[in-house]
Image: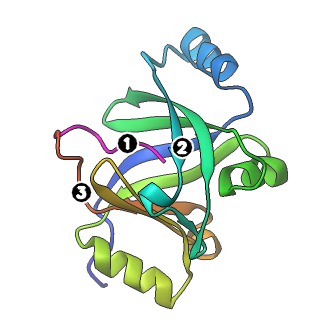
Amino acid sequence: MREPVFDGTVQLGIVVRDLEATVRRYEDDYGIGPWQFQQIDLGEEHNYREYGRPAERSNRVAIAKVGRVMWELIEPLDEDGIWARFLAEKGEGVHHVAVAAPDFDEAVARAEREDGVMLRCEHSGVDIAYLDTRRDLGVVLEVFSGMPSDGGDPDPT
């Protein structure tokens, strides 16, 4: 058996239609919280690419920790991005799982050779990539090059 490409689960990325309503449901029905809210606008200043092409995307997110795993709720604010397309095609649900990759560059290079890279950008001092592992694993994997310089959790995308 080969050495693992990934060595930890860091985050679940869940696409939702209504961020506030979903947060209320998670808090009231499951006790998940507290939540931190943020609007994220991605574009050229973040070297944002979808399938290798420059794009501008906006979304609102809410973040909470469940144990050691970050839960990221994503409400797309545009109609064309990967999160909006997921919502239109599949409805609300888990879009991606962020995993720790001991070698970010190798994980991305492998995806470029095999399945492809759906998203690539820089945010809060880290490089981020969504690997199109849906065919093999049934879900998109997110990897990042490290933690932001302030030592906190990676900012969501």
- Indicate which disc residue 54 carries: none
Instruction: Classify mark 1: helix, strand or loop.
Output: loop
Tell me whether circle 1 and circle 3 mark residues in contact (CB < 8 Å): no
Task: Give the alpha-carbon distance from disc 1 to disc 3, as whole Å.
Answer: 11 Å
Task: Give the alpha-carbon distance from disc 3 to disc 2, as whole Å.
Answer: 21 Å
Amino acid type of the residue that numbered disc 3 sits on in the rendered structure: Gly
Residue displayed at 48% across by 90% down: 113
**In the rendered image, which quarter contains the N terminus?**
bottom left
Tell me whether circle 2 and circle 1 mark residues in contact (CB < 8 Å): no
Residue 20 x %, y %: 64, 18
Instruction: Classify mark 2: helix, strand or loop.
Output: strand
Amino acid type of the residue that numbered disc 2 sits on in the rendered structure: Asp
Q: Earlier in the sequence, mark 3 or mark 2?
A: 2
- Indicate which disc residue 155 carries: 1
Instruction: Classify mark 3: helix, strand or loop.
Output: loop
Stretch in magenta: 151-157
Name of the residue lying farthest toward the front: 45
Amino acid type of the residue that numbered disc 1 sits on in the rendered structure: Asp
Q: Earlier in the sequence, mark 1 or mark 3?
A: 3
The colour scheme applied to this rendered structure is rainbow
- Indicate which disc residue 146 carries: 3
Above or below 62: residue 132: below
Residue 104 x %, y %: 29, 71
Residue displayed at 48% across by 19% down: 32
User: Which is nearer the eye, 120 or 71?
Assistant: 120
| Horizontal side of residue 110 vs 125, given as left or right | right
- Name the residue that disc number 2 marks: 41
Q: Of tags 2 and 1, which is closer to the observer?
A: 2
Residue 81 x %, y %: 69, 55
Above or below 54: residue 100: above
Q: Of tags 3 and 2, which is closer to the observer?
A: 2
Residue displayed at 57% across by 71% down: 132
